[in-house]
């Protein structure tokens, strides 16, 4: 039921490829894409926001076959067309069909402007099939023919009529191969759980019935597999004569709600009587709403082959097989369910720890029942890290290996991984296993509660007491000096939502202190306490010099206190000097005439003020140095290689193209 090959396999094989399915995250688009993708891998799901595409997540579509594209941006469409060169284009992207989609401007932008942008990038050798709507007929809804007048009765209907005329215009003027399929009441696999048929079958499986409107309301129900076949027939049999036309995709049979309930009660042996009127009629509910599919049957040889009873039965079997209540309903209610989590590990001299890190991460993600991506960033380590990472990439396609041209530091390593991460959120970790993967479930729980950033708070460190005291003191001082609130004892170990990742990656500054930038960007944040263990292998690459350098970097990146301190010191000491002059005069002539003349006071004052001056200049120099670094605009890192599973990208052009593709 879930993985069976469609009966129209031969038609899928004949499609001109590559194949684009715009709106593949929607109900019909997901079915169309899924059936084509079962047969051929040059089919791509084009969606605006993959993080909310719960159907594609449950279908476990490889990221390589999901394309992020905003149809409201001509540049976005142009880029993906130039890269993939699609030959068959199915456009099922739409907005405004449901009552909850009530943004009028977005309705016209998506359904009209989005259609224009796609058509503008099509050529005569491409095939473009558009998902229209039976609502285009509006008030003229009683079995209309395609030549009958359209009388739209909503903004959505007006926008779909506009799109239909656009297709006709581009077919006649630009010579494009276009068709508009006016879909009636499509039902079946992957439909939104809050719609009529899904709710009806969900209740019928439990021998019950949902709330119902008037029994006289009618529809023309078409099973989704028949609808998919209609799109395939349209793409394969379109010619210059038919191009630009609109066709009805319907059964031609009027089915009232009373008929629907009767068929359901019979098919599922339901004794319960329906409670008509327990749900109020919607404004688009009509008593005579059904179509005339004669033209499409004659021109394309298509006919709806699935009876209503058979369609309802097959859909019920699908609900059972897919674990509908446990998987589909929760995913629909919360699109973040079944997410992809990307772990980014900054590695330097961690060859021994990497295999253990991988095993513990996979175990953690499997226990969470989430999909994962693991990115190991080899920051030009002198050991055999790259070989170890390559071996893991060879056996697991979900692992990515990045190699840098030199050691750029952990902050650059994290950003390098964040730029190409495909997950709904990322987890930043050091490669020495001092950031325990077993803490990730606690991060995940907070992220699911709505927090955009969840950071680890080190309540205890397994290290020598004096070093522990140094770290605690630094964080306390840093928190007091910083001009933004920065959590105390919070390192890089954190889970960050995709929208925050995008903001961090887009920040232009060259010198990064991620835990400070993470606080600076804002969003909803919280901490999770954990005990930071000692390194499992080797010796820490940190030393006192490096720790002091880190402290300076943090303070001079997120605090003006040193400059302010020198200003206050300047004012204070100047005032003290003036008081000293007055005291010297008063002491010499009035209070202590025998005050000795000596060099010690002069020397001390010269050394003191000289040291203070040098200290002030050094503070100023630190800030000037940071300005100097930022003005050079050097890249934060240089990659020499990227491994995605078994495939390696080595040349600069290959790496650049991959990064451009993956960066959202």
Image (cartoon, rainbow, N blue to C red):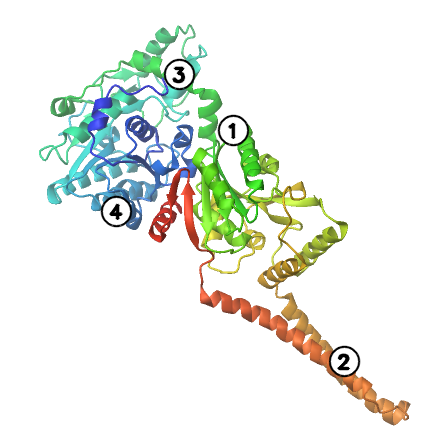
Query: Which of the two marks, 1 or 3, is nearer to us in this view?
Result: 1
In primary-sequence order, the first of circles 3 and 4 is 4
In the rendered view, does 456 fall on the left or right side of 309?
right
What's the mark number on residue 369? Answer: 1
Query: Which of the two marks, 2 or 4, is nearer to us in this view?
Result: 4
In primary-sequence order, the first of circles 3 and 2 is 3
Q: Is residue 652 above or below residue 373?
A: below
Query: Which of the two marks, 3 or 2, is nearer to us in this view?
Result: 2
Please state the horizontal and vertical placement of residue 290, each as a whole percent of the image.
Answer: 23, 21
In primary-sequence order, the first of circles 1 and 3 is 3
In the rendered image, which residue does mark 2 sit on?
A: 576
> Gap between marks 2 and 1, in whole Å?
68 Å
Please state the horizontal and vertical placement of residue 142, each as a whole percent of the image.
Answer: 21, 23
In the rendered image, which residue does mark 3 sit on?
A: 201
Q: Mark 1: few, some, or many residues within 10 Å (few <14, many ≥20)?
A: few
Q: Residue at x 55, y 28 (%)?
A: 367
Residue 289 visible in rendering = no
Query: Which of the two marks, 3 or 4, is nearer to us in this view?
Result: 4
Query: Which of the two marks, 2 or 1, is nearer to us in this view?
Result: 1
Element at badge 2?
helix
Q: Residue at x 44, y 29 (%)?
A: 332
In front here: 178 or 135? 178
Question: Residue at the left extreme?
Answer: 241
In the rendered image, which residue does mark 4 sit on?
A: 82
């Amino acid at each position: 039921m879930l993985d069976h090959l469609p009966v129209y396999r031969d038609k899928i094989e004949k499609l001109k490829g590559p194949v684009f399915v715009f709106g593949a995250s929607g109900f019909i688009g997901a079915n169309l894409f899924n059936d084509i993708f079962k047969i051929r891998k040059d089919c791509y799901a084009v969606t605006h926001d993959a993080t909310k595409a719960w159907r594609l997540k449950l279908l476990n579509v490889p990221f390589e076959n999901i394309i992020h594209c905003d149809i409201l941006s001509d540049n976005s469409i142009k880029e993906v067309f130039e890269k993939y060169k699609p030959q068959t284009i199915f456009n099922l992207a739409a907005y405004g069909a449901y009552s909850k989609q009530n943004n009028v401007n977005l309705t016209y932008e998506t359904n009209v402007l989005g259609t224009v942008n796609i058509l503008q990038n099509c050529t005569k050798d491409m095939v473009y099939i558009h998902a229209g709507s039976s609502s285009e007929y509006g008030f003229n809804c009683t079995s209309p023919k395609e030549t009958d007048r359209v009388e739209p009765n909503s903004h959505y209907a007006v926008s779909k009529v506009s799109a239909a005329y656009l297709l006709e215009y581009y077919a006649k003027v630009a010579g494009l191969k276009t068709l508009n399929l006016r879909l009636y009441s499509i039902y079946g696999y992957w439909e939104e759980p809050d719609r009529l048929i899904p709710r009806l079958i969900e209740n019928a499986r439990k021998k019950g019935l949902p709330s119902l409107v008037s029994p006289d309301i009618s529809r023309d129900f078409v099973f989704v597999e028949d609808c998919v076949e209609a799109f395939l027939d349209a793409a394969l049999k379109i010619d210059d004569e038919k191009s630009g036309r609109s066709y009805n995709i319907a059964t031609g049979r009027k089915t009232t709600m009373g008929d629907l309930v009767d068929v359901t009660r019979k098919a599922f042996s339901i004794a319960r009587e329906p409670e008509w009127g327990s749900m109020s009629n919607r404004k688009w509910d009509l008593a005579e709403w059904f179509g005339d599919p004669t033209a499409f049957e004659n021109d394309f040889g298509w006919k709806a082959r699935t009876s209503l009873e058979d369609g309802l039965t097959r859909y019920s079997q699908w609900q059972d097989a897919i674990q509908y209540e446990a998987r589909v309903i929760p995913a629909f209610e919360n699109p973040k369910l079944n997410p992809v989590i990307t772990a980014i590990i900054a590695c330097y001299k961690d060859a021994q720890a990497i295999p253990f890190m991988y095993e513990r991460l996979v175990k953690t993600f499997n226990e969470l029942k989430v999909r994962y991506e693991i990115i190991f960033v080899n920051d030009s380590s002198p050991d055999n890290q790259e070989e170890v990472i390559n071996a893991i990439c060879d056996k697991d396609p979900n692992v990515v290996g990045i190699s840098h041209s030199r050691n750029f530091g952990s902050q650059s390593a994290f950003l390098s991984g964040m730029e190409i991460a495909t997950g709904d959120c990322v987890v930043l970790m050091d490669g020495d296993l001092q950031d325990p993967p077993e803490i990730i479930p606690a991060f995940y729980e907070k992220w699911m509660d709505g927090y955009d950033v969840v950071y680890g708070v080190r309540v205890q460190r397994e290290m020598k007491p004096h070093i522990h005291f140094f770290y605690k003191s630094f964080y306390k001082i840093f928190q007091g000096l910083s001009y933004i609130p920065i959590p105390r004892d919070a390192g890089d170990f954190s889970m960050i939502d995709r929208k925050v990742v995008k903001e961090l990656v887009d920040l232009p500054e060259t010198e990064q202190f991620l835990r400070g930038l993470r606080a600076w960007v804002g969003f909803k944040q919280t901490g999770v306490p954990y005990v930071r263990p000692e390194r499992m292998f080797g010796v820490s690459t940190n030393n006192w010099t490096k720790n002091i350098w880190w402290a300076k970097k943090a303070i001079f990146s997120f605090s003006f206190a040193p400059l302010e301190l020198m200003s206050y010191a300047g004012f204070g000491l100047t005032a003290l000097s003036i008081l000293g002059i007055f005291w010297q005069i008063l002491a010499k002539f009035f209070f202590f005439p025998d005050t000795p003349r000596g060099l010690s006071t002069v020397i001390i004052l010269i050394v003191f003020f000289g040291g203070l001056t040098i200290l002030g200049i050094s503070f100023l120099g630190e800030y000037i140095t940071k300005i100097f670094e930022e003005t050079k605009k050097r890249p934060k890192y240089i990659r020499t290689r990227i491994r995605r599973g078994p495939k390696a990208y080595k040349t600069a052009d290959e790496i650049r193209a991959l990064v451009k593709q993956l960066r959202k």
